[in-house]
C-alpha cells in the first residue's frame, strides 16, 4: 500500500505491492530517543538493502523490523542521508500491509495519550488533505455528530499548501484547536449541549493538531517540503486511532479512498488487523462524503465487512448549492447555516451520519477479538 498513492491521496492508481519479507533478522530497538548527532545512531544499511532495490527487486521488511525502523525514524535516530534513502525507497516500493501495521504500532509510541470517554465510543476523523475545489465539509460532519452527544476527535494538519484545512474552518467557526492531549480528553467528555461559543453547540468535540498529538510524526510529515513528495507518515497519520489504548472498542475510525480499486485493498488490510473502521469514498482525500453524489459505505470490524450504504446510482438528483471550496469564510458561514437549520444537510452526508450511528449502536454487541 504505497504511502504516496494511498486511497486518500489524489494521485494515480498503482496497486500496492506485497513482496515477501526479506531474510533480515529482527533487531530490538536500541534505547533512547532523539540522540545528539553522532550518538546512538540507528544502523539502517541492512534495511535499506532490502527495501531500496527498486520496484522489482525490493522486498518488504518483516513486521517487527518495519516497527523498529519506523520507531528509530520517529525518535530522530536516523541521520538525514539514510532517512532520505528510506523515504524514497518506500516511495518507490510501497509499503506492504504488514509493514504499515508495524509502522502504526511504532507511531503509537510517539503519540500523546488521550483518555477514552467514559461509557461512550468515540469517532476519530483524520483530516490531512484540505479542500482544493470542493468545500471541505469535515467540520460539518464532526459537528452533526458531536451535537448529538457523540464524542468526536478530529486530528489533522493546520495548513497544507494553499488548501482550506479543517482546522482553518473550525477556527473560523469559533472552535479553537486543543493545545494539549489533556485538553482534548476534557473536550471529549463534554455533554451534548456544550457550546463552543454562543449559538454554536459543539458538544464533545476535540480538534487536535498533529503537531500537538505527535511532534515526531509532524517532523516526518514536514519532510515533504524538503523532498517534494509524500512519505509513509502521510498514510500512518490517517490510520491512527489515538484514543485510550488504541483499541477498536474505544473508537470508530473513519477512512476514505479516492480510487475505487483501493476499496478492496483496504478491506483486505483492515480484515487482517483489529479494526473498527467506516470506509467510504471521500471528498478530495477527506473522509467526509461527497455532498454531490451518493457512495458506498462499509463497516469493517472484527474481521467482518458490512455494507451500510450501497446506492444503486451515484447521482442524488439535483446537487445542492455549495460554497466555494477555497473561501474559508463563506464555507464556515455555509456550515453554520446547515447547523442552524437554514440550509438542508446534504443527503450523502446525512446518510454517512446515519451509518456512523448504526456502527456505534451495533458496536456494543461486537466482541472485538483480533481476526488474526
Image (spheres, rainbow, N blue to C red):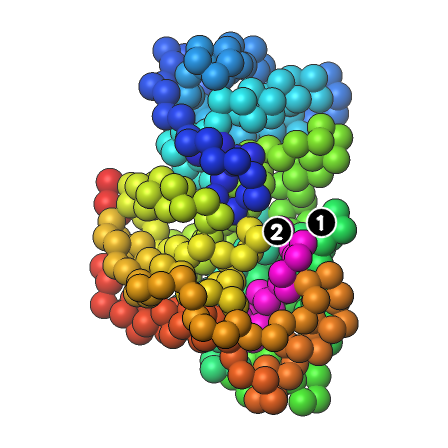
In the image, is residue 131 part of the stretch drawn in magenta? yes
Q: Earlier in the sequence, mark 2 or mark 1?
A: 2
Region rendered in magenta: 128-144
Residue 123: assigned label: none
Per the model, the C-alpha gap separating discs 2 and 1 is 8 Å
Q: Is residue 83 visible?
A: yes
Characterize the local packing of mark 1: few (<14), some (14-19) or many (20 or more) Cα atoms within 10 angstroms: few
What percent of the width, then of the height, locates residue 102? 43, 34
In the image, is residue 106 part of the stretch drawn in magenta? no
Q: Nearer the viewer, residue 250 or 348?
A: 348
Q: Element at badge 1?
A: loop
Residue at coordinates 58% horizontally, 72% vertically from top-left?
A: 140
Number of residue marks: 2
For label 1, the residue is 160
Answer yes or no: do the residues labelled 2 and 1 have beta carbons within 8 Å?
yes
Instruction: Say which quarter of the image contains residue 228.
Output: top right
The answer to whether 27 appears left or right of 182 in the picture is left
**Is the C terminus in the top left, top right, bottom left or bottom right quadrant?**
top left
What percent of the width, then of the height, locates residue 67? 47, 30
Residue at coordinates 41% horizontally, 21% vertically from top-left?
A: 60
Q: Element at badge 2?
A: loop
Residue at coordinates 53% horizontally, 72% vertically from top-left?
A: 319
Residue 128: assigned label: 2
What percent of the width, then of the height, locates residue 124? 49, 61
What percent of the width, then of the height, locates residue 235? 53, 41
Q: Is residue 205 visible?
A: no
Where is 76 relative to 144, above or below?
Answer: above
The answer to whether 259 appears left or right of 87 in the picture is left
Where is 34 relative to 174, above or below?
Answer: above
Q: Residue furthest front?
A: 318
Residue at coordinates 49% horizontally, 56% vertically from top-left?
A: 282
Characterize the local packing of mark 2: few (<14), some (14-19) or many (20 or more) Cα atoms within 10 angstroms: many
Amino acid at each position: 500500500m504505497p504511502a504516496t498513492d494511498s486511497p486518500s491521496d489524489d494521485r494515480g492508481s498503482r496497486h500496492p505491492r506485497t513482496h515477501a519479507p526479506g531474510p533480515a533478522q529482527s533487531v530490538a530497538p536500541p534505547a533512547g530517543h532523539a540522540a545528539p548527532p553522532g550518538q546512538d545512531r540507528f544502523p539502517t544499511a541492512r534495511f535499506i538493502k532490502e527495501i531500496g532495490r527498486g520496484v522489482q527487486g525490493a522486498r518488504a521488511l518483516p513486521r517487527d523490523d518495519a516497527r523498529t525502523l519506523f520507531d528509530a525514524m520517529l525518535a530522530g535516530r536516523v541521520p538525514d542521508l539514510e532517512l532520505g534513502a528510506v523515504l524514497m525507497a518506500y516511495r518507490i516500493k510501497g509499503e506492504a500491509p504488514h509493514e504499515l501495521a508495524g509502522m502504526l504500532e511504532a507511531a503509537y509510541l510517539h503519540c500523546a495519550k488521550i483518555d477514552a470517554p467514559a461509557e461512550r465510543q468515540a469517532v476519530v476523523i483524520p483530516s490531512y488533505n484540505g479542500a482544493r475545489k470542493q468545500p471541505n465539509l469535515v467540520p460539518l460532519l464532526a459537528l452533526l455528530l458531536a451535537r448529538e452527544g457523540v464524542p468526536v476527535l478530529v486530528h489533522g494538519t493546520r495548513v497544507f499548501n494553499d488548501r482550506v484545512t479543517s482546522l482553518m474552518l473550525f477556527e473560523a467557526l469559533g472552535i479553537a484547536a486543543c493545545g494539549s492531549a489533556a485538553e482534548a480528553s476534557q473536550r471529549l467528555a463534554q455533554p451534548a449541549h456544550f457550546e463552543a461559543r454562543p449559538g454554536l453547540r459543539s458538544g464533545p468535540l476535540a480538534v487536535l493538531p498533529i503537531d500537538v498529538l505527535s511532534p515526531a510524526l509532524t517532523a516526518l510529515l514536514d519532510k515533504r517540503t524538503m523532498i517534494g513528495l509524500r512519505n509513509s507518515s502521510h498514510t500512518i497519520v490517517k490510520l491512527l486511532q489515538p484514543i485510550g489504548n488504541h483499541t477498536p472498542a474505544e473508537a470508530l475510525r473513519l477512512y476514505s479512498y479516492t480510487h475505487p480499486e483501493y476499496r478492496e485493498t483496504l478491506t483486505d488490510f483492515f480484515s487482517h488487523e483489529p479494526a473498527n473502521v467506516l470506509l467510504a469514498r471521500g471528498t478530495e482525500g477527506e473522509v467526509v462524503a461527497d455532498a454531490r453524489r451518493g457512495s458506498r459505505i462499509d463497516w469493517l470490524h472484527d474481521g467482518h465487512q458490512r455494507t451500510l450504504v450501497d446506492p444503486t446510482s451515484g447521482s442524488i438528483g439535483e446537487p445542492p448549492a455549495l460554497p466555494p471550496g477555497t473561501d474559508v469564510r463563506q464555507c464556515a458561514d455555509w456550515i453554520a447555516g446547515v447547523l442552524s437549520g437554514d440550509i438542508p444537510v446534504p443527503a450523502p452526508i446525512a446518510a454517512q451520519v446515519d451509518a456512523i450511528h448504526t456502527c456505534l449502536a451495533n458496536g456494543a454487541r461486537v466482541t472485538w477479538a483480533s481476526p488474526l
